[in-house]
Image (tube, rainbow, N blue to C red):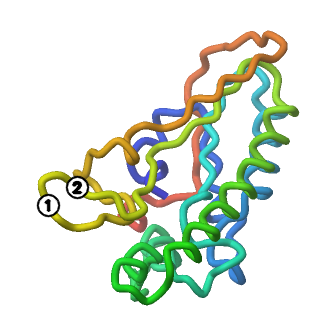
C-alpha cells in the first residue's frame, strides 16, 4: 500500500495486487497472484521496466498463519479503515519465548521457497534482464552491539548486516527496448480517502 500512498504518480502504471488479489484465508497476497499480475503488466507494457514486489518471505507465513503476523489491519488502514489488529508478529512471539526459533525459521524458509518458485517462473516469462533482490533481511537472534539482547525481525533504524545486506541475483534475457512515457492515471484511489 505504501507505493500507492507515497509514489504512485512517479510510475507509468501501478498494479495494486494487495487490493485486488487479497487472500482472506491466508491473510496476505500469494506469490502466484503477484506473478500473474506481473505477467499481465508485462503484456500491457512490453517496453517498460517492471518493479515487482512480492510480500513473501515476509510474514504472515503462508503455510503457518498460526505463528502470527497479521497484516490485515495495515491493509484496512490503507483502504481507509482502521488498523484494529493486535499484530503479534512471529518475531515478537519468538522473542517472548512463545514459539521456537526452529518453527519460525522453517516457516520463513517455506515462504522463501514459495516466492522463489513464483519469481523464477516470472523471470522465465519476462524478456530482458531481471534482478531478484530484497528490500531488507531479517534478524533471527543476532545481537545488536553494544546491547546484550537478541534481536528478531526488521524494525526501522536497526542497521546490522543481516538486515541491510541483501541478495542480488541478476538474470540475462533477450534484449528489450525501453520507452519513456508519462504516467497513466489511476482512478482507483481517492487521496483524501486513502489518508
Mark seen at residue 147: 1
Q: Secondary structure at mark 2?
A: loop
Q: Residues within 10 Å of mark 1 (few under 14, many from 20)?
A: few
- Rendered residue at 37%/66% (across/down): 152
Q: Is residue 96 left or right of residue 76?
A: left
- Rendered residue at 77%/13% (across/down): 176
Q: Nearer the viewer, residue 66 or 79?
A: 66
Which residue is under mark 2?
144
Q: Secondary structure at mark 1?
A: loop
Vertically, is 99 above or below 154? below
Vertically, is 59 above or below 103? above
Tell me where residue 164 sits by quadrant.
top left
- Rendered residue at 66%/23% (across/down): 170
Tell me where residue 167 sits by quadrant.
top right
Residue 148 percent across, percent down from the top left? 17, 64
Residue 7 percent across, percent down from the top left? 42, 41
Residue 142 percent across, percent down from the top left? 34, 58
- Rendered residue at 60%/46% (across/down): 53
Measure the alpha-carbon separation of dots 2 and 1.
6 Å
Vertically, is 193 above or below 5? below
Q: Tell me whether the residue at label 2 lies in contact with that at label 1, contact meaning CB atoms closer than 8 angstroms.
A: yes
Amino acid at each position: 500500500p505504501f507505493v500507492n500512498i507515497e509514489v504512485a504518480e512517479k510510475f507509468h502504471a501501478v498494479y495494486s495486487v494487495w487490493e485486488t488479489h487479497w487472500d482472506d484465508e491466508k491473510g496476505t497476497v500469494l506469490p502466484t497472484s503477484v506473478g500473474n499480475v506481473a505477467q499481465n503488466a508485462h503484456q500491457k507494457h512490453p517496453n517498460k521496466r517492471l518493479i515487482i514486489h512480492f510480500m513473501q518471505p515476509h510474514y504472515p507465513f503462508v503455510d503457518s498463519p498460526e505463528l502470527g503476523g497479521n497484516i490485515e489491519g495495515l491493509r484496512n488502514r490503507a483502504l481507509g479503515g482502521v488498523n484494529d489488529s493486535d499484530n503479534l508478529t512471529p518475531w515478537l512471539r519468538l522473542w517472548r519465548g512463545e514459539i521456537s526459533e526452529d518453527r519460525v525459521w522453517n516457516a520463513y524458509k517455506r515462504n522463501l521457497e514459495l516466492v522463489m518458485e513464483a519469481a523464477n517462473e516470472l523471470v522465465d516469462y519476462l524478456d530482458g534482464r531481471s534482478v531478484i533482490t530484497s528490500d531488507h533481511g531479517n534478524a533471527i537472534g543476532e545481537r545488536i552491539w553494544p546491547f546484550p539482547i537478541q534481536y528478531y525481525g526488521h524494525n526501522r533504524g536497526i542497521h546490522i548486516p543481516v538486515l541491510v545486506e541483501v541478495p542480488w541475483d541478476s538474470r540475462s534475457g533477450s534484449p528489450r527496448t525501453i520507452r519513456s512515457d508519462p504516467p497513466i492515471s489511476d482512478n482507483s484511489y481517492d487521496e483524501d480517502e486513502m489518508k
